[in-house]
Amino acid sequence: MAVDAQAVFHAGGRGRIDLLEYVVRSEQLDALFLLLVAEFQLHPTTAKALALYELFCAWGAPARITLPRLLPPHDVRLTQALAPYVRDARKLDELRGQPADAERSEPPPSLMLAPPKFLFDSLATALLAGSDSPLDRLGHDYDPELTPLENLPGGKMSARQKFFVDFIWTPRIRPRLVAAGFRSIANVA
């Protein structure tokens, strides 16, 4: 039974949490990236953009998506597009370290300007191209009538999946995404 993963995700509630739980436990990182990009597009912020880039796109990212030709070091367009936001984030961190009454030699960074919601569109389009996109695979593999664990082959996580959840997702990826504003994954895995 094929399911529209995006519809389940956007419907919210327990179905959304279960879908995200399954995606993380089954290490479907391309699908997770696509779902988070859809959430980013609804309310783009600098923190969300930097978290998506650093966790899914940067060289050595812990959840790097499977588009090596469109990511650094092969393609630096996304890195260049994010450069002004990285500079603003660094300036904000520096300003936070100053006392409130300290004189500033320059105005505060313009963090009020959100990054464009289409920032990750080229990556999303590339992931969705073809007949076997990550969301299509997810829709074929996932049964909303089953629990996230029951959806896994054999009804349990493999050693690799347990390692990913325990040592990569829980201590590194999830806290960073939640801090950036992706609240939907706060209790996932």
Image: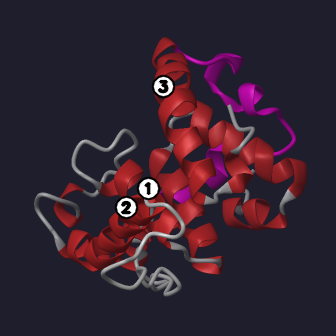
The residues bearing labels 2 and 1 have C-alpha atoms spaced at a distance of: 5 Å
> Relative to the observer, which residue lies in front, 56 or 122?
56
Q: Which residues are magenta?
A: 132-158
**Lateral position of residue 11 relative to residue 21, left or right:** right
Q: Quadrant of residue 103?
A: bottom left
Query: Please, what secondary structure does the residue beneath circle 2 have?
Result: helix
What residue sits right under mark 3 in the picture? 164
- Identify the mark nearer the N-term, 2 or 3: 2
Q: Quadrant of residue 95?
A: bottom left
List x then y, in percent, for residue 87: 29, 71
- Identify the mark nearer the N-term, 3 or 1: 1
The amino acid at mark 3 is Phe
What residue sits right under mark 2 in the picture? 94
* Front: mark 2 or 3: 2
Q: Residue at x 30, y 78 (%)?
A: 84
> Relative to the observer, which residue lies in front, 156 or 170?
170
- Residue 143 visible to the viewer: no
List x then y, in percent, for residue 134: 49, 55
The residues bearing labels 3 and 1 have C-alpha atoms spaced at a distance of: 35 Å
